[in-house]
């Protein structure tokens, strides 16, 4: 959640930054009006409290002097009622401010470029050159049909559209990728964690999926449970409502989970193949750090995911996302896009974000800095989307006859 005190203290600067993210100006005006109303209410309360203190001193004086205090008692009692009403007024205003703040995205870092969508993202670096084929490379669904690796029709029969079943070497390669990714991340210092594949509403609020993105979640009927859209949710919420010791930081975690998304608003996009599914496997990186360490850990996570792709021999590029293309909780995001020769284009395979203290404020994750409890910084990133990595291997390692060579790094896992 955005820091309300920061917005109130420097409203114009923060509002300008939030406009870069497409936040409605009317919403910001409403927020400003509530801050002003709260300030007036606070002044009225302080005046009533000062009056109460004055009357309390007078009360003692009257008693010492033997004066009649009945009239003063009545005034004190009435003022107490006014103070109680003013406190309630302030509580309601704070509640309204918090409600609005819960729907406002994170403030973008100053070095995040302006822009509204992926067309305005900035390429930072290309890693590995795409291979030149002596034949027209096939797309992954054509290769899946030739090799029997992905059964789209039966996946739909079992569930519905945007579900598929992996078979034969495709299923084995998916499992090999998961194990390889977890081992790779663990060797880079990330603790492997096995987490629930469901989470409650408090957890989803903590990482920013609720209330704004409820339509993209699969809800368990008659339970306060949702299928997780990413392992970021359970991993980050391991520490919800906790105070960590400074020497425990940074906490660096990795986990494999299936992920479940309704893909609301994606009608007509990537309907063919396995690019955009309702259920997909992903290995995630999550870090919980002090504010001073978060930039260094962010770079470490980007490097880890990029090196993983490099170890598989997959050409990719790093993209700095513009303000309008970042996820709700992110202050800064770098996407890794892998080259798919069948499509002749780069496609997102990893998204690494620093959310600063945005999620920590929602989830109440703090650390003890001397005598003070401060919000931590939380970071998350795909390392990697497993299905898309499988697709990238299929397309980049395909042969003229449609067969697929397994990358050397994975052969021990098969």
Image (cartoon, rainbow, N blue to C red):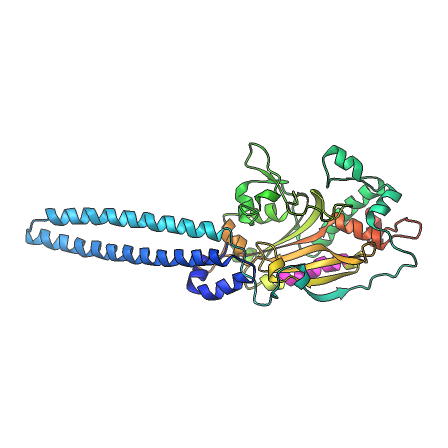
Q: Is residue 365 shown to the viewer in this render?
A: no
Name which quarter of the figure residue 409 lies in: bottom right
Name which quarter of the figure residue 58 lies in: bottom left
Which secondary structure class fits the magenta region best?
A: helix
- Which residues fall within the magenta stretch? 297-309
Front residue of 131/354: it is: 131
Q: In the picture shown, does residue 9 fall above or below 362?
A: below
Front residue of 125/285: it is: 125
Q: How many marks?
A: 0
Q: Is residue 205 shown to the viewer in this render?
A: yes
Q: Position of residue 354 (x, y in %)?
A: 60, 59
Relative placement, left or right, of 35 versus 106 is: left
Does 329 lie within the magenta span? no
Relative placement, left or right, of 368 versus 389 is: left
Q: Residue at x 77, y 48 (%)?
A: 177
Q: Residue at x 55, y 47 (%)?
A: 212
Relative placement, left or right, of 279 versus 147 is: left
Q: Residue at x 57, y 64 (%)?
A: 109
Image quarter in which the C terminus is found: top right
Front residue of 329/141: it is: 141
Q: Position of residue 399 (x, y in %)?
A: 91, 52
Q: Position of residue 36 (x, y in %)?
A: 37, 59
Q: Position of residue 13 (x, y in %)?
A: 48, 66
Residue that sits furthest to the left in the current view: 66
């Amino acid at each position: 959640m955005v820091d309300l005190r920061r917005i109130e203290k420097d409203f114009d600067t923060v509002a300008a930054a939030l406009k870069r993210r497409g936040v409605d100006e009317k919403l910001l005006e409403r927020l400003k009006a509530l801050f002003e109303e709260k300030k007036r209410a606070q002044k009225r309360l302080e005046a009533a409290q000062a009056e109460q203190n004055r009357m309390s001193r007078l009360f003692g004086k009257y008693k010492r002097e033997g004066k009649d205090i009945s009239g003063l008692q009545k005034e004190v009692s009435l003022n107490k009622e006014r103070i109680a009403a003013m406190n309630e007024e302030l509580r309601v205003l704070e509640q309204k401010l918090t409600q609005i703040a819960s729907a406002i995205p994170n403030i973008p870092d100053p070095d995040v470029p302006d822009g509204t969508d992926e067309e305005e993202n900035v390429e930072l670096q290309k890693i590995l050159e795409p291979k030149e084929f002596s034949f027209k490379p096939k797309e992954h669904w054509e290769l899946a049909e030739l090799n029997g690796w992905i059964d789209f029709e039966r996946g739909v029969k079992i569930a519905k559209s945007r579900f598929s079943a992996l078979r034969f070497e495709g299923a084995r390669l998916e499992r090999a990728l998961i194990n390889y990714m977890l081992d790779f991340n663990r060797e880079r210092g990330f603790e492997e964690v096995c987490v629930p594949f469901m989470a409650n509403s408090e957890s989803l609020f903590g990482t920013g999926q609720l209330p704004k993105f409820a339509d993209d979640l699969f809800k368990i009927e008659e339970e306060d449970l949702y299928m997780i859209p990413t392992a970021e949710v359970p991993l980050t919420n391991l520490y919800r409502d906790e105070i960590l010791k400074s020497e425990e930081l940074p906490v660096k975690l990795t986990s494999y989970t299936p992920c479940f998304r309704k893909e609301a608003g994606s009608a007509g996009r990537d309907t063919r193949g396995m690019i955009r599914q309702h259920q997909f496997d992903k290995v995630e990186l999550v870090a919980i750090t002090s504010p001073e360490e978060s930039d260094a850990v962010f770079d470490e996570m980007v490097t880890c995911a990029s090196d993983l792709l490099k170890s598989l021999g997959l050409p990719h590029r790093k993209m700095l996302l513009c303000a309008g293309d970042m996820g709700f909780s992110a202050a800064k995001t770098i996407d890794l896009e892998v080259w798919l020769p069948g499509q002749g284009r780069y496609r997102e395979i990893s998204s690494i974000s620093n959310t600063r203290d945005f999620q920590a404020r929602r989830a109440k994750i703090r650390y003890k800095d001397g005598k003070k409890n401060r919000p931590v910084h939380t970071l998350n990133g795909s390392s990697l989307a497993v299905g898309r990595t499988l697709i990238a291997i299929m397309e980049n390692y395909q042969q003229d006859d449609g067969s697929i060579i397994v990358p050397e790094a994975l052969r021990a896992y098969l």
